[in-house]
Image (cartoon, helix red, strand yellow):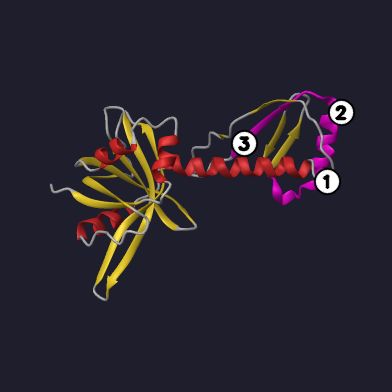
Amino acid sequence: MAAIEIYLKVNDSFFEKYRNNQYNTLSPVALKSALNIQRMCFFQKYPSSDKGSRHRILVPFSSDRAIEFIVYLGSVKIDDFTQKYFYRVQKAKEISLFNPPVNDTESSLVFFNLIAFDDKTGSEKKEFQTLYQTVDAQQIPQADIQREKDIAIWNKYVLALKKLVKEKEQIWKITDVSKPYYSNKTDSDERDSFIDISIDEKELLRNLERNFKALFNKDDIEEYAFEQSKVFIEF
């Protein structure tokens, strides 16, 4: 099986940001060398952004480490008959990878060329276009869908706190805020998401409940409960 050549376009600050990440072990020179060697890599569809469809590329470079790229498709028109394609790199970092992914994953033997932001180089090969289309037709891995939901839940949590202190700053004795967690529903792909907030002040709890009822519409929340040691809110 012949390796597919893929062009990765990076901005001027790419190598500086990569070097400054304390969790990255490869130097810029070692990174370039690792990418320019033919190796089996793994491609997954990634949640879209305002820039459009995105993919994740996992490039193993040791028995337990890989470079993770979040990319989206770019192209440059050379003339009326020639269009060159590349992946524009949005994020890049090293991650632990002990077992290659299998579900919702396309694997292919590839090697990469890192190109500058203003470089007009790209791929005209049908093999790259076919790989892109195959990955883009995949389902987004379930772990990434849940990660996006977690971000949305935390954003709502921050919004709730801002609403509750919009008139004046209050100090609450919050002893613990849980990570988002999910119900145990098995009869549906959609699971309810929750956050628990533990507090320990009777008067502040009463004020919190009054403010909560005054500031939130019924459509904003599914269910809530105010107890002595815990506040439960389901968005």
Asked if residue 2 lies left or right of residue 98, the reply is left
For the residues labelled 2 and 3, the Cα–Cα distance comes to: 25 Å
> Residue at the spot x=26%, y=52% of the render?
6
- Residue 183 point in image, percent of width and height: 56, 35
Query: Distance from label 1 to label 2 (Cα)?
Result: 17 Å
**Would you name the residue on which mark 1 appears?**
214
Q: Is residue 205 magenta?
A: yes
In which quadrant of the rendered view does residue 225 lie? Answer: top right
Asked if marks 2 and 3 touch (Cβ < 8 Å), the reply is no
Q: Position of residue 89 (x, y in %)?
A: 38, 50
1 or 2: tag closer to the N-terminus? 2
On screen, residue 212 versus residue 130, left or right, reads right
The quarter of the displayed image where residue 61 is located: top left
Residue type beneath disc 1: Ala
Q: Can you say which quadrant of the picture contains the C terminus?
A: top right
Residue 48 seen anywhere in this rendered image of the structure = yes
SS category of the residue bearing label 1: helix
Q: Which residue is mark 2?
A: 203
Label of residue 194 in the image: 3
Q: Earlier in the sequence, mark 2 or mark 3?
A: 3
Residue 102 in view (yes/no): no
**Residue 13 part of the magenta segment:** no
Secondary structure beneath label 3: strand
Q: From the viewer's side, name the closer residue of 115 and 46.
A: 115
User: Which span of residues is magenta-colored?
Assistant: 193-222
Residue name at image x 31 percent, y 57 percent: 86
Q: Is residue 194 above or below residue 10?
A: above
Q: Upstream in the sequence, badge 3 or badge 1?
A: 3
Check disc 2: other Cα within 10 Å, few if <14, some if 14-19, many if 20+: few
Residue at x-position 69% and y-position 37%: 233
In this rendering, position of residue 31 left or right of residue 216:
left
Q: Is residue 186 depicted above or below 11 in this figure? A: above
